[in-house]
Amino acid sequence: MQARPVHRFSFAERAIHWLAALSFLYAALSGLALWSHHLYWLATVLGGGVVTRWGHPWGGIVFALLVGAMFLIWARQMRLDSDDRTWLRHAKKYAVHDEAGLPAAGRFNGGQKMLFWGQVVLTLLLLASGVVLWFPEWMPRNFRLAAILIHPIVAAGSIGMIILHIYMGTAAVPGSFRAMIRGWVTPGWATSHHPKWYREISKN
Amino acid sequence: MHTVAKLVDTSTCIGCKACEVACQEWNDQDFTISGFDGSYQTLPDLEHNFWNLIKFNELSREDGQMTWNMAKYQCMHCVDPGCLRSCPAPGAIFQQKDGIVDFNHDLCIGCGYCITGCPFDVPRLSPNSKKVYKCSLCSDRTAVGLEPACIKACPTNCLTFGTREDLIQIANARAGELKQDGHAGAGIYNPEGVGGTHVLYVLKDAADPESYGLPKDPKIPWTVSLWQGPVKWLGNLLFTGGILGAFFHYLRYGPKPTGDEEGSDA
């Protein structure tokens, strides 16, 4: 049974997503190198401490710009509706595959929308605190004292969310990785995971 | 092992700046041309290439005359150094067994976290090398049994080099002398908030170190301690918990149905 593929992500969406993923990976690994002395070997792998200190802010800037691009293309579709709120209240059921009572998801489900808005907010915080840490010689002492605490806390939260996102996008939800790589899903996948979206695009 | 220290008896400092010159000479520093700001002080503050500054703190006396609370300012070589605690590059800042806190510039990555972590605002980032510099307590001299350059140059014995234990005794004795001479508030400056320092001061007015340009109760900033302590542990817990949680979720619940299984209606 070879079902006709359903177009899910455009080339532009996939390109922006994967550029963001690469820049996040670099910013996260170079950041973790400076997070703990036990992870400093990451800095050695990435070209040494001086290169890491130079490159980490630039990696972060690239990631922030790509989050901005994702905001432009996705913000409208990421608005939470009442179904999403109900979905989020019962997210535990989604996690254990007991989806009988869950509202049908649109193009993005409540969890994906929370990831999106979470990343938007955390990236803004990382950008603001990161710029302070980037140029310590120009920054007032109180700004630096705040940034030195805020930046690692927010970064840890962001990395935690992305660990979950990577698991969901690969092992946990088969078909979703192909959707982001090749851009299409099967009709069965669309019906099963995003029925409201599939109904809408089938109408046209 | 005895730790070393430097004692600054501010009551005998004459502001000759011989220590500043000796520091520049020994450490082979270029000199920063500074503007004139109406003070006898060489520079307004420490610089990346100027590690030892006599602060000419101007005060008005009770009789209306002006007086100076002169105090040598440099790295305090804290027992619990905030710079070391905040440094992300292993080995770039280190604390010797003799108590000297020194930088290894080959390992310094120039992030400037030590500048933020220092409660005395001492380390300075060089705009040229993008690395951070400060007084090394002449570790290259003390390692071969010489006293630091500033102490070698001091003409009034305001500066003394020795073991920290000895110098605390000498400092207390000197504070006692000053008290007998009518300076009732004399005492030593060895701030507890950073575990004590390897640069000790005798002050005529120990209750008001700020009049000498020294912070009253220096502590490692709480944001630095919080980040280096609980935040790191919670973060590590989050990372390992996230990865293990995902793994065990997969073991327990497996993947979502794809919607294309046998018997599904799509």
Image (cartoon, coloured by chain):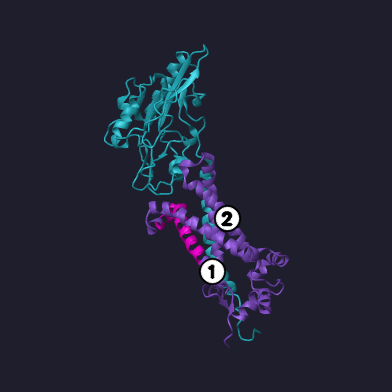
Tell me the element at label 2.
helix
Q: Which residues are magenta?
A: A17-42
The residue under label 2 is A122
Residue A3 to residue A148: above or below: below
Asked if residue A22 is among those painted magenta in the image, a careful observer would answer: yes
The residue under label 1 is A12
* Chain name for mark 2: A
The purple-coloured chain is labelled A
Asked if residue A29 is among those painted magenta in the image, a careful observer would answer: yes
* Chain name for mark 1: A
Magenta-colored segment: predominant secondary structure: helix
Residue A196 picture location, percent across and down: 68, 74
Q: Amino acid at mark 2?
A: Leu
Q: Are marks 2 and 1 on the same chain?
A: yes
Q: Is residue B148 visible?
A: no
Report which quarter residue B105 is drawn in. top left
Report which quarter residue B261 is drawn in. bottom right
Tell me the element at label 1.
helix
**How far apart are the alpha carbons under marks 2 and 1?**
23 Å
Verify CB contact (< 8 Å) between mark 2 and mark 1: no
Tell me what residue is drawn at x 49 percent, y 33 percent: B192
Residue B81 picture location, percent across and down: 44, 39
Crowd class of label 1 (few under 14; some 14 to 19; many from 20; radius 10 Å): few
Give the camera-side residue of A134 and B180.
A134
Give the camera-side residue of B40 and B209.
B40
Hue of chain B?
cyan
Residue A19 picture location, percent across and down: 49, 64
